[in-house]
Image (cartoon, helix red, strand yellow):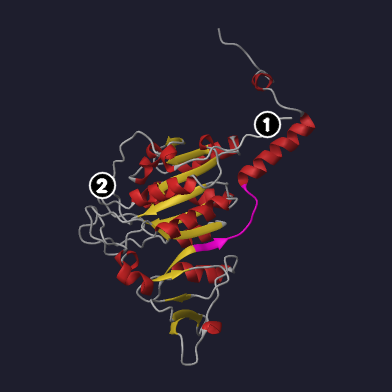
Amino acid sequence: MSEVVEPEKLTRKDLVTDQEVRWCPGCGDYAILNATQHVFTELGVPRHNFVVVSGIGCASRFPYYMNTFGFHTIHGRAPAVATGIKITNPELSVWIVTGDGDSLSIGGNHLIHLMRRNVDVKLLLFDNRIYGLTKGQYSPTSEIGKKTKSSPFGSVDRPFNPISLALGAGATFVARSVDVFTPHLKETLRAAHAHRGTAFTQIFQNCNIFNDGAFENIREKSLREDNLLQLQHGEPLIFGKQRDRGIRLGSPYRPEVVDLGEGIDEKDLLVHDEQGPMGYLAMIAEMRPPHFPMPVGVIRRLEAPTLDGGVREQIDEVSSRKGRGDLRDALYSGNVWEVE
């Protein structure tokens, strides 16, 4: 009988490297790193089966600080490298760490096709609405009017909504969390890991040097409860410090914020459905303060075939019919000649 080897029981210390963590003091990346290391210890995955892949940017230093396998790749191309890794070795748990500039600007095409193909990788988008590593230019998620070194009179670009982009690309798992909401962020990371397919998670992350306070209305304790909507599948859309406000469908087919009481109760509210129609999901994606609370949690989650699974099945099927190929035979088949 073959001996069953139990996965090693990891601690956070096992995932900490000997590298000095070099982000600016107070950066939200520290909180995300800490949460990720803790969650990795709970997943039952051997340490040698984790791979963290990044592109370019502040967030992309992540592989140096995770004591796992990792690749620090080139600008915007982490999804391409991660796809190759997952297809080559499906046993690996592959995580992409990227920023709003890295993934939504130069890497935009790679990002949308990763989600369209539903490769079984987990993507963490650190969104601080600024270019941090290159010292404060506006990014694809910066708001209109943002004054930066590259837009001294205010940006005139319309920003991306990463959640709407992910839904439009057909992502099968779409979620949002916040750097300092540690329990919520951990719960979201666990859900991403459990999903088979591309798990896209936008994480609002404060850049206290170049864009401090960009998410103050949802990060600060005194403000967050009136400005956040925590989504739970099958639960009504309720928010507020007293849990006394909600979202219902008004007329004509537009969401509206209502106060509970005086003839309005939970049965009048919209109920969150992770497998809901695209019209509902798009409506959730577009909610934001000051007119609506900011939704956080799992927005969409559904099952669909994965690219890596399809490739492996195709290889197995063809191999069963034609036998395993031989690289040397392939190279020396057909018209071959030697150059003296």
Kind of residue at badge 1 = Glu
Magenta span of residues? 298-306
| Residue 113 position within the rendered picture, expressed as x and y whole percent measured from the top left | 53, 49
Kind of residue at badge 2 = Cys
Residue at (41%, 47%) from the top-left corner?
A: 98
| Residue 135 position within the rendered picture, expressed as x and y whole percent measured from the top left | 24, 47
Side of 330 relative to 145 (left or right): right
Q: Quadrant of residue 276?
A: bottom right
Side of 135 relative to 280 (left or right): left
Residue at mark 1: 3
Residue at mark 2: 24
Which mark is nearer the camera, 2 or 1? 1
Q: Residue furthest bottom?
A: 262
In the depicted view, which residue is nearer to us: 339 or 12? 12
Q: Is residue 25 above or below residue 167?
A: above
Dividing the image into 4 quarters, which one contains the N terminus? top right
